[in-house]
Image (spheres, grey):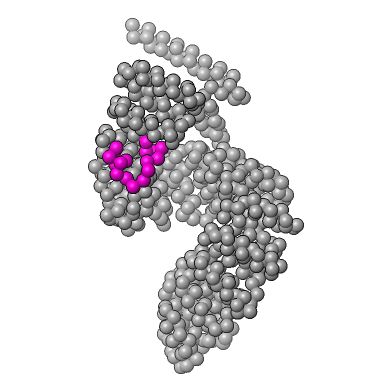
Amino acid sequence: MNLALIRKLHDVRRSQWTWSPSSFFFFFSSSSLPPLEHARAHIQQLLCHCSNLNHIQQTQCFMFTRGLDQDDILLSRFIYTSSSLGFSSYAYSVFIYNHRPSIFLYNTTIWALSSANSTRAISLFNTIRMLGLRPDSYSFPFVLKAVVSSSNVVVGKQIHSQAIVAGLESHHSVATSLVQMYSSCGNVSFARNLFDGVALKHVPLWNAMIAGYAKVGDMANARNLFDFMPEREKDVVSWTALISGYTQSHNPNEAIMLFRRMQLQNVQPDEIAILAVLSACADLGAFQLGEWIHNYIEKHRLRKIVPLYNSLIDMYAKSGNISKALHVFENMKHKTVITWSTMIAGFALHGLGKEALHVFSCMEKARVKPNEVTFIAILSACSHVGLVEVGRDYFASMRSKYGIEPKIEHYGCMIDLLGRGGYLQEAKELVRMMPFEANAAIWGSLLAASTRCGDAELAAEALRHLIVLEPHHCGNYSLLSNTFAALGRWSEARMVRKVMRDKGVEKVPGVSFIEMNNRVYEFIAGDKSNVYFVGICDVLHSINRQLKVVNLNRACRGH
């Protein structure tokens, strides 16, 4: 509904204009109007049941015909509902036609626009004082949310100054929003100064500061602050902020240990906490714990939000149980593009290229438009099973069929596909033609492909670039040395090893993970400091002796 129609409705709202309500609004009668308070209650009920733009427009018509379009509480609720359903522009158009907006309406509209149109939200906040209104403890958090969306710390500082002038800098919700704003804009030290300056720290403020450190990967400060926080005040948000931080900082073991400690403290995890720990399980391949979490979700009837089940698919796939991942996928009623992409990537990870392509075909039939991540998964699937021609077609269709401009990750997948298929010159030509500077992943793919095909010259060229991009990556030197050795070029192989020693490049020891009794154990090759070292060696020697006996018995029976 545009502004012209809104004006028309406004002009006729008090006339004898009649409007036939649809079956959706069955509890209204067109012949007799209910009392004003009764009408308000019914409109609030309608807003609770709105699910699309048509419902929103019909509700607005009722507000106009009953003269309730200037009711601040109803109008605020209407703007909130419209925005929550994704119609922020419509909500704004309703707001600007109001002739006497209050601070209450301004706050609601700023909130409605804070994510969808942050620039307009900030502009709206700046007009409050021009109308002689005074921003309150709701105005600042809502506009600061818009600042976070735009990542504009300069504007954030200006709003901070206004909060000081208004005497609201230390108000609990304003202080929390300021800490979140500075942290999100990368100024964590400024956020900490603000945090330290608040005398009475409430739980959301603690959580905001912990999350701020976690967001930038400063887990030492995040953990110190968490440990210093009063134990009785730690809630599920506090624990989740730290668990998410460890997961994002590639420390899944610590995330899982913290999750267990959280349970011992009888803090019930919510959907966000479960999402964080599922990601850690996926990184470690902790199938048993992941399965326990799945059962926990079902047992406690957590909201079956789509991201939660997307994470379950990812966890099962990365933990080696692709059939369980498929089971979760097939039982999801609502699938987003992320759901489809995760399942395709899971099949690709297991080398099931044809199954991945079948899922993509089903995705197209379901009229779900693929995104950039989908094509990374598809091209990876083609690479795993050597479907070079199919991969070429998908790569070409990104731009021609779906209007998706390939990024360096897609070129990397395509170069890997060509290299694995033995099309080294085509892969090299694609590196030359792509509109990006080749990164370490692309040169690494070429190095691996040339090693498999015995092309020492291309391998040497790839290594020259890798030495610049990854000067201390031992695997690159080893691959080239092995290539020369396989071709019998021993002097050159020794030369590569010498360069490796001269540059001080050390071989990274191998690492393995074993899950037992819901706990993941990490083992590093040659690590004698492990508390289980002696016991592990005893078991390995015992297995070795038993294998020798078995082999000896087989040899005797063979004679």
Q: Nearer the viewer, residue 344 or 46?
A: 344
Image location (x, y in percent) of residue 106: 58, 74
Q: Position of residue 443 (x, y in %)?
A: 37, 36
Single out the residue that lies furthest toward the right.
Answer: 199
The one of 402 and 406 positioned closer to us in this rendering: 406
Residue 16, compared with residue 260, is above or below; it is: below
Where 136 sits versus 330, above or below?
Answer: below
Q: Give the x, y percent position of residue 437.
A: 37, 43
Residue at 46% over, 74% down: 90
Q: Main secondary structure of the magenta part?
A: helix
Identity of the residue drawn at 54% across and 47% down = 276
In this view, which residue lies farthest toward the left?
A: 389
- The residue that appears at 44% across and 45% down in the rendered structure is 314
Quick check: 118 left or right of 236? left
Inspect the magenta stretch and tell me whether residue 429 lies in it.
yes
Total marks shown come to: 0
- Left or right of residue 229, residue 296 in this image: left
Image quadrant where one finds the N terminus: bottom left
Q: Is residue 29 above or below residue 111?
A: below
Q: Residue at x 26, y 44 (%)?
A: 392
Residue 421 visible in this rendered orientation of the protein = no
Is 452 situated left or right of 171 in this image?
A: left
The reply to whether residue 199 is visible in this rendering is yes
Q: Is residue 437 magenta?
A: yes
Residue interval drawn in magenta: 427-443
